[in-house]
């Protein structure tokens, strides 16, 4: 006689014959997936001296005041890359003093001198692109192709701001007084505190530091604790090309990140804080910085709408969605978070998107066939899992993916049948889920797209020129991609509205955030 437990197991297997097989093969697949990842060799650097295991202050490689260190890991394997000093308030204060001393001379250099040095730094980055990309992939996990792209993208900020350094024009203002003349000049704000994230370990630094140095400011940088090696490699190159001591400083920290951030924000010698990261941390830094009325640039979280209208070129929209959504495995502030598709093309779009996502190959960033690397760490996969479970429990359908592959790996996922009550609607996933909402009218989708406190980027695909203008004007975001899924570059202003931040980076506006306008009234004429 079959006992009760065995019988019910048997019945379940009959009702769902593939179930036990799937479970077993999933486990086997997962084990072989991870052993393949563990077997991937880290490429050797042609210049190993770019991998620095110390912080960088006043052109010196320094340890902290204590023996405190923290480890940096390869997100794909969790293997340790190296140890760095875990610095705190005192070391930050010391770096600020060096930056302040350096400011006395750096702020007096000509725009042409700063142009020449930034241009040399740009050349050095491009000459070392492969090594810098290797370091970036190793500590961040993105594919080596994406990392090479980020190095080139990051370097353009040095080139662009080198060219802006010689164009910080003032104005001559027509006077209403016959005996007076009015002019304005632009001057560097002073020492800048820079706090950057792990998702673009190079480009988020160059976008800020390029502008700051071009303006005549000096900087103290706190890079993301997960990805400090890219920042330090940039410092090694800065030193080689002759950027003077104290102009660029990097404080490394993990445990004391809140203390270092606080010191940067409270210290009166720092005149500006530039931060890229979450809205929550941005608000904290902004409130701390208000105590000494510092200038702030805040590039914060988003909840980007990506809209596909019936009249769109669907293939182009699919390509745009793939690029916008899955770049960096869904870990960019400008990633599409809510994909709204008009009724008439919903099924077609969903089907084509799912087909393409099925072709993705998740793996170690150094594997040649990998299209999408790991997330930054295992913890980051939890929100993705939560968003999927929440959506499925409220009626969404899973078209592709949906599984945590163990460690930091998550399958690129497509969900359909999304509704407003689901967590993705209000929270930035920061992971590889394309969440598809169906809509009817232009008015309805604009209302839905703007129904968020965030306003960084928005995207839409349409071939109707009237609609293009109407929707571009009505989206409450700092940036809009029309028939384009990738909008970031050094030439255009990057930044948000609403709770996505203040200030603009890159473009002709980027340098202004690091300068004060001084008005000079000349009388007695
Ligand atoms: C970000 O995610 O913070 C920046 C993305 C970009 O530069 O495109």
Image: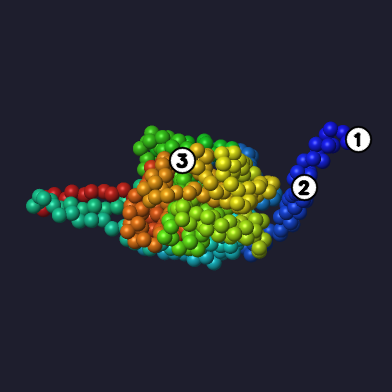
| Left/right of residue 171 with respect to residue 196 in the rendered view | left
Q: Residue placed at 57% from the left, 51% from the top? A: 414
The reply to whether the residue tagged 3 has its Cβ within 8 angstroms of ligand 1 is no
* In the depicted structure, whether residue 274 falls above or below residue 51: above
Q: Please report contact status of discs 2 and 3: CB closer than 8 Å, yes or no.
A: no
Residue 204 visible in the displayed image: no
Q: Residue at x 52, y 39 (%)?
A: 423
Q: Residues within 10 Å of mark 2 (few under 14, many from 20)?
A: few
Q: Which mark is residue 1?
A: 1
Please tell me whether mark 2 or mark 1 is closer to you in this view.
Answer: 1
User: What residue is at 11 percent from the left and 50 percent from the top?
Assistant: 176
Task: Give above or below for 367 relative to 219.
Answer: below
Asked whether residue 338 is in view, the answer is yes
Query: Which x, y percent locates residue 110?
Result: 35, 59
Q: Earlier in the sequence, mark 2 or mark 1?
A: 1
- Counting residues from the N terminus, which is met first, the one under dot 2 or under dot 3? 2
Q: Nearer the viewer, mark 1 or mark 3?
A: 1
Which residue sits furthest right? 1
Q: Which residue is mark 3?
A: 279
Residue at the disc numbered 2: 17
Could you tell me which quadrant the N terminus lies in? top right
Label 1 sits on a secondary structure element that is loop
Residue 66, percent from left and from top = 61, 38
User: Residue 211: x percent and y percent?
Assistant: 40, 54
């Amino acid at each position: 006689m079959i006992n009760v437990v065995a019988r019910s197991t048997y019945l379940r297997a009959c009702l769902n014959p593939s179930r036990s097989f799937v479970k077993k093969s999933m486990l086997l697949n997962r084990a072989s997936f991870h052993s393949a990842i563990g077997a991937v060799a880290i490429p050797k650097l042609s210049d190993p001296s770019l991998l620095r295991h110390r912080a960088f202050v006043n052109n010196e490689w320094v340890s902290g005041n204590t023996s405190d260190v923290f480890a940096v890991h390869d997100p794909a394997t969790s293997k340790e890359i190296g140890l760095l000093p875990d610095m705190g308030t005192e070391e930050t204060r010391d770096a600020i003093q060096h930056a302040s001393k350096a400011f006395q001379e750096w702020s007096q250099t000509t725009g042409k001198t700063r142009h020449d040095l930034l241009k040399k730094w740009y050349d050095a980055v491009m000459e070392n692109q492969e090594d810098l990309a290797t370091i970036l992939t190793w500590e961040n996990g993105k594919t080596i192709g994406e990392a090479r792209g980020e190095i080139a993208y990051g370097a353009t900020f040095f080139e662009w701001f080198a060219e802006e350094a010689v164009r910080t024009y003032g104005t001559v203002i027509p006077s209403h007084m016959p005996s007076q003349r009015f002019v304005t000049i632009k001057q560097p704000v002073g020492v800048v505190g820079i706090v950057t994230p792990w998702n673009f370990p190079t480009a988020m630094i160059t976008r800020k530091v390029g502008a700051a140095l071009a303006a005549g400011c000096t900087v103290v940088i706190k890079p993301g604790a997960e990805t400090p090696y890219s920042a330090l490699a940039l410092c090694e190159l800065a030193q080689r090309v002759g950027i003077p001591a104290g102009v660029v400083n990097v404080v490394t920290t993990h445990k004391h990140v809140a203390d270092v951030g606080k010191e940067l924000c409270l210290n009166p010698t720092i005149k500006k804080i530039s931060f890229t990261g979450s809205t929550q941390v941005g608000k904290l830094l902004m409130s701390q910085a208000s105590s000494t009325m510092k200038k702030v640039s805040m590039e914060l979280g988003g909840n980007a709408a990506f809209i596909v209208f019936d009249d769109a070129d669907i293939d182009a929209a699919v390509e745009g969605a793939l690029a916008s959504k899955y770049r960096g495995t869904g870990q960019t502030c400008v990633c599409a978070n809510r994909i709204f598709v008009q009724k008439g093309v919903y099924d077609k779009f969903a089907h084509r998107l799912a087909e393409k996502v099925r072709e993705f190959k998740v793996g170690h960033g150094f594997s040649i066939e990998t299209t999408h690397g790991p997330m930054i760490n295992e913890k980051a996969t939890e929100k993705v899992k939560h968003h999927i479970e929440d959506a499925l429990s409220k009626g969404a359908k899973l078209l592709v993916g949906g599984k945590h592959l163990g460690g930091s790996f998550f399958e690129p996922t497509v969900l359909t049948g999304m509704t407003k009550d689901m967590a993705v609607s209000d929270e930035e996933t920061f992971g590889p889920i394309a969440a598809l909402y169906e809509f009817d009218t232009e008015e309805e989708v604009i209302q839905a797209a703007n129904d968020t406190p965030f306003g960084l980027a928005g995207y839409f695909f349409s071939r109707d020129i009237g609609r293009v203008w109407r929707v571009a004007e009505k989206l409450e975001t700092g940036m809009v991609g029309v028939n384009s899924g990738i909008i970031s570059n050094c030439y255009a202003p990057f930044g948000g509205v609403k709770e996505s931040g203040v200030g603009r980076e890159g473009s002709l506006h980027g340098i202004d955030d690091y300068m004060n306008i001084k008005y000079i009234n000349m009388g007695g004429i």
